[in-house]
Image: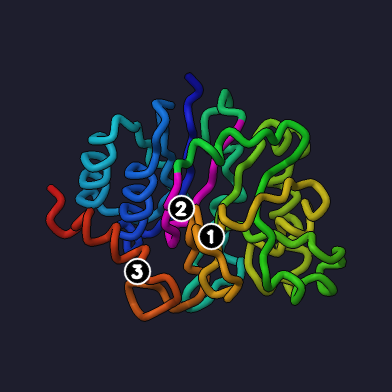
Amino acid sequence: METIYIVTAINNNFAKHMAVMLFSLFQNKKSRNPLVIYVLEADLTEGNKHKLKKFISRYNAFVHFIKMDDRIFENCLISSHITKETYYRLLIPNLVDHQVQKVLYLDSDIIVHDDITRLWETNIDEFFLAAVEDPLGHYRLEALSIPENSYFNAGVLLINLSKWREHYISEQTMRFIAENPTKIWWWDQDALNAILFDKWLKLDMKWNYQALSGIPLQYPSIVHFTSPTKPWNGEPPLKEYYDYYAKKLNWERLR
């Protein structure tokens, strides 16, 4: 049975929210496929690591914490709600075991409301990644010199690591960031789109439903809170998805 490899990136302040995301994933996974989770982090406390390990082990999943060196990203654009952790995903092919050929990257500000196995089983042999088109991506097309309907959101990425390694995608994206500082508005997502705009498989928007988009969708499989207003600090659309799993998990009482 094929192992599902999940990668996420957090700082210590997001430990709870990543746990809620993973809890929603565990609650809705129907398959018996084993789960291996890579957590990319720079400042997790030992207390939070221990808490996460115990929580994840309850679902027969394995977790690996990978310590990052933030100095690599010291010249990268950040903002009030986007931290250096967003750039970690660019280095995934060099961080996980080289025998791993495919991973599913998930932001920590999402809720998985479907069996993740269905997304994992998407065939991306001929693509560098699979993703959902960003409904606001048209704002970035001209600056990045890419055609219409070719800008994806990087919060949910099914990544073909073999092709990334073969074509040095990590190095290409980091070079683009360094050489085009005035073109970068939407952080690493801009760099990924500039390099891979014609090399990705478009997924149904239900697999990364951006709550702020306003596009009606009755049954989102993944809800993504992309705005600065998160369900834990405000009232974004579909906040109830986060609240439901956060209440069931009860992070504060986990031991």
Camera-near label (2 vs 3) is: 3
Is residue 22 in the magenta section? no
Density class for disc 3 (Cα within 10 Å; few <14, some 14-19, many ≥20) is few
Residue at (50% x, 51% y) in the render: 106
Measured as percent of width and height from the top left, residue 13 is found at 32, 64
> In terms of secondary structure, where does tag 2 sit?
strand
Q: Label 2, label 1: how many angstroms apart (C-alpha)? A: 7 Å
Does label 2 or label 3 sit earlier along the sequence? 2
Mark 1: give few (<14), some (14-19) or many (20+) Cα within 10 Å.
Answer: some
Mark 2: amino acid = Ala
**Magenta residues (range):** 102-114
Q: Which is more N-terminal, label 1 or label 2?
A: 2
Where's residue 157, x and y in %?
60, 48
Quarter location, residue 155: bottom right
Which residue sits furthest top? 1
Question: Residue 74: where, in percent of width, then height?
Answer: 56, 64
68 vs 151, nearest the viewer: 151
Amino acid identity at mark 1: Thr
| Residue position for label 1 | 86
| Residue linked to disc 2 | 9
Q: Furthest-front residue in view?
A: 218
